[in-house]
Amino acid sequence: MSPIKDLNLVYEALNQEDTFSQGDTIVGTVTFTLTKETKVKGLVVKAKGEARVHWTEGTGDQRSSHNAHRRYFKLKECLVAENEKGTELRRGDHQYKFRFTIPQGDMPSSFKGLHGKVVYNLEAKMSRSWRMPSGVQKELNFVSRSGFHPGQVLAQSGSVEKKMGCFSDGAVQMSATINTNVCSPGDTVSAVGKICNSSSKQMRAKFSLQQRTVYRAGCSTNCSNLSLCKMVGETIAPNSEETVSCQLMVPADVIPSLHNCEIISVDHYLKVYLDISFAIDPKVEFPLVIVPTGAAARQPGGPMGPVGPMGPVGPYPAGDFGAPSYSDFAPPAFPIGPYPVPACPGAYGYPAPVPTQPYIPSGDNNQWPQPAPPSGYSVAPSFPVQHPNPTAPPVFQQGQEPPSYVSLFSPPPLNKS
């Protein structure tokens, strides 16, 4: 019978959601009880994050297996030094504390699917001579801060609109709009569809939230599609025009979108389509990015936007992601004429750039000095500005001939030798 009893591993939660992200510190304790003095070869605790996919295809001799693995980090701490001869531990209760800092990096959030998973674990293992090791494992709920890159996610300041062309049987036209393309579990997405049914068939407008998961192993892929929720609108009669709307709530247990894993990706989209009997259903699909609760910030008077490394991002008009475009600045403060005058710093309504400062070490806490001018004031240039002063051309009276070239520019005297 093993003398090791009640081997347990606990960690301190950082928030109410019990989640961890890049740069967070995991503080925990390993506890156990020994019923007698025991020699231990080592007690280690590990923290690791990895992604795995696996699926099989075919049957019999045609059966093939596909696997892929990615490791994001692996940390190890020895609580009892590893020793082949063993370390004698006394009888009774034992308690060991540990601390890990999750490294920075582009790592995906925790995920579990049909053919793959992304997991982050804490594991404590005690080894003894000629015995099977004793261990305990706890899973961490990891929420990535780097899963939504600029350019991949862009919340629109207005509605997003797509249109569908004519249907083959008569003239069936459909257009639809949604209020946002970034949301969290529990949020509501509003969709409005306009249908012009000039055909002889009646039809129904339907709204569906879809999830598409792709697993990759080498050159092989395995895709799965799942309908998360669906709503059905009213019947649209032949030769009529209707506007239908829908308030679709994102399920609370939906898996967030996953875009930064090489071997697993999870995408969502809202599908608006017409259910027509014995015909191909016209559809409009809107990509949605579902972020974990708390990872998106609501903008006042606008839709939801993603949170980047420097805080809330968007919504913004077209241009560089996360920054206004050139057309958003005020017009120049000087009149534009045939001879424009160079603008001074601050003429466009924003402070002039601060000149680059040299790096000055200051003891143990080296900092870059960052003086900033007050708002509305400009910084004087650190060098004199010289303007050319060309000589005005000579003025001649009417009827007077201009002097010759020789009289204006006499040749230099010749050196007589």
Image: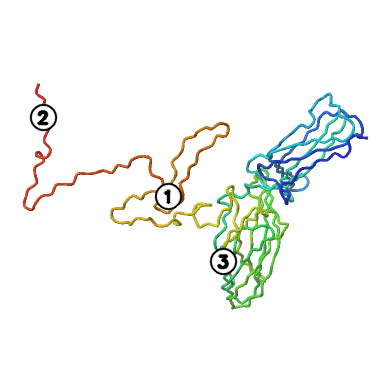
Three-letter amino acid code at disc 2? Pro
**Farthest residue toward the right?**
1
Residue at 69%, 58% in the rendered image: 185
**Farthest residue toward the top?**
417
Residue at 70%, 63% in the rendered image: 229
Q: Earlier in the sequence, mark 2 or mark 3?
A: 3
The image shows residue 99 at horizontal and vertical percentages of 73, 37
Looking at the rendered image, the disc whose residue lies closer to the viewer, 2 or 3, is 2
Q: Nearer the viewer, residue 329 or 274?
A: 329
Q: Secondary structure at mark 1?
A: loop
- The residue singled out by tag 3 in the image is 164
Q: Secondary structure at mark 2?
A: loop
The image shows residue 306 at horizontal and vertical percentages of 60, 54
Instruction: Say which quadrant the C terminus sits in.
Output: top left
What's the distance in space between the residues labelled 2 and 1, CA to CA? 57 Å
* Residue 166 position (above or below residue 25): below
The image shows residue 157 at horizontal and vertical percentages of 54, 61
* Residue 395 position (above or below residue 124): below
- The residue singled out by tag 2 in the image is 413
Q: Nearer the viewer, residue 209 or 8?
A: 8
- The residue singled out by tag 1 in the image is 377
Instruction: Say which quadrant the N terminus sits in.
Output: top right
